[in-house]
Image: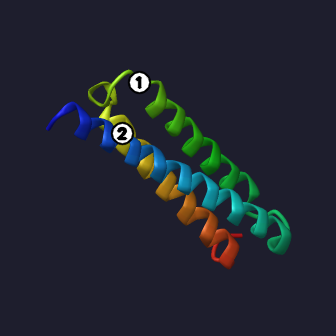
Amino acid sequence: MTERDYEDARSLISVLLLCFVAAVAAYLWLADMFSGQRAFGVLLSAVLLGFSMLVYVYRQPSYGAISKPLLMLGYLALAILLSLSVAMTMGYIA
């Protein structure tokens, strides 16, 4: 892969994280209105984790400097937090 390909991959990761943060923030706003803040803390932590991952990707000098295991761990944590908040909103978890 060329350096340009690495930078394109880095940009794609950043755009996906930014879209995730925006979507969860919008869902957080709607869930706060309709569910009485049941999942507010979990969704807020997902937004902050996604934002911190976005900052991490932007702060690295190159694509090669990004820790792939750390990024995958962040994605796993985001999936768990999002699943937990959906379960709370649907009423499966009290």
The local secondary structure at tag 2 comes to helix
In the rendered image, residue 56, in percent from the top left (x then y), is placed at 48, 30
Nearest the camera: 65 or 38?
65
Q: Residue at x 38, y 21 (%)?
A: 61
Q: Residue at x 73, y 52 (%)?
A: 41
Q: Residue furthest top?
A: 61
Quadrant placement of the N terminus: top left
Q: Please give the residue where the numbered disc 1 appears in the rendered image.
A: 60
Within the image, what quadrant is residue 92 found in?
bottom right
Q: Residue at x 34, y 30 (%)?
A: 66
Nearest the camera: 69 or 10?
10
Residues under numbered marks 1 and 2 in contact, where contact means CB atoms less than 8 Å apart: yes
Task: Look at the picture and state if 40 lies above or below 59.
Answer: below
Question: In the displayed structure, does residue 88 sit left or right of residue 18?
Answer: right
The local secondary structure at tag 1 comes to loop
Q: Residue at x 63, y 56 (%)?
A: 22
In the rendered image, residue 87, in percent from the top left (x then y), is placed at 61, 71
Q: CA distance from mark 1 to mark 2?
A: 10 Å
Task: Look at the picture and state if 15 lies above or below 85.
Answer: above
Q: Please give the residue where the numbered disc 2 appears in the rendered image.
A: 10
Q: Residue furthest front?
A: 4
Nearest the camera: 23 or 43?
23
Q: Name which residue type carries label 1.
A: Gln
Question: In the displayed structure, does residue 22 sit left or right of residue 55?
Answer: right
Q: Earlier in the sequence, mark 1 or mark 2?
A: 2
